[in-house]
Amino acid sequence: MKDLAIYPGTFDPLTLGHVDIIKRAARLFGRIIIAISAKPRKTTLFTAPERLAMAKSLCAQIPKVEADVFDGLLVDYIRAKGAHVIIRGLRAFSDFEYEFQMALTNRQMAPDIETLFMMTKESYSFLNSSMVREVAALGGDTAKFVPDFVQKELNKKTGIRSQKSGVRIQN
Ligand code: ADP
């Protein structure tokens, strides 16, 4: 299926940087699946079902976008879906080495699958999920970093009510 692209990641949680990549990818492909890694290398704040539920809230807002959880090798999942394209986002030079190694490893295993890199939107180039988790845990306002439905879940997790003041990082 040539017009299907898979956007894999941990999404712990989904940020506005991810959303921007998804919206732009949706202009290039007929169908996008946000593929949530069930057991990533890192420990997560949100469980896989929780990360999936947040991604599904986004899917309800953007046509052509679906969300799913996968376990095991990404290339196996992509083949099972009949897809040939992996979307990844690039923020800074520091992303490059890991992404390069992963793309080449995946290519060794599955030469028919292509990894497509999309540059971050400038205003989200600093944004990553771990920073968002940290701001939330310290009681900061995450409204500028994540969709509102994610902010609600973050506040529940960290036991912090939605607030107007707090840490704010300017774009
Ligand atoms: P992973 O653990 O697989 O890196 P992440 O959820 O951290 O999962 O990221 C998924 C993908 O989204 C990665 O390709 C990452 O580079 C990209 N990404 C994360 N944050 C941003 C952002 N702010 N702008 C663009 N791409 C991003």
Image (cartoon, grey):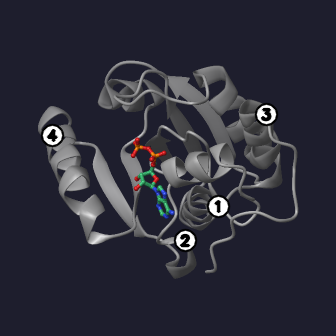
Looking at the image, is mark 4 or mark 2 earlier in the sequence?
Answer: 4
Alpha carbons under labels 1 and 3: distance apart: 22 Å
Q: Nearer the viewer, mark 4 or mark 2?
A: 2
Would you say the beta carbon of the disc 1 residue lies within 8 angstroms of ligand 1? Answer: yes
Specify the quadrant of the image occupied by residue 107: top left
What is the crowding at mark 4: few (fewer than 14 residues within 10 Å), some, or many (at least 20)?
Answer: few
Question: Which residue is denoted by mark 1 in the rendering?
Answer: 16
Q: Earlier in the sequence, mark 1 or mark 3?
A: 1
For this view, does 16 lie left or right of residue 28? right
Q: Of helix, strand and loop, which one carries label 1? A: helix
Q: Which residue is mark 4?
A: 105
State the residue position of label 3: 159
**15 relative to 6, above or below:** below
Quadrant where the image shows the C terminus:
bottom right
Is residue 111 shown left or right of residue 75?
Answer: left
Q: Earlier in the sequence, mark 4 or mark 3?
A: 4
Label 2, ligand 1: CB separation under 8 Å? yes
Which residue is nearer to you in this view: 119 or 168? 168
Task: Identify the mark at residue 124; answer none if there is no mark.
Answer: 2
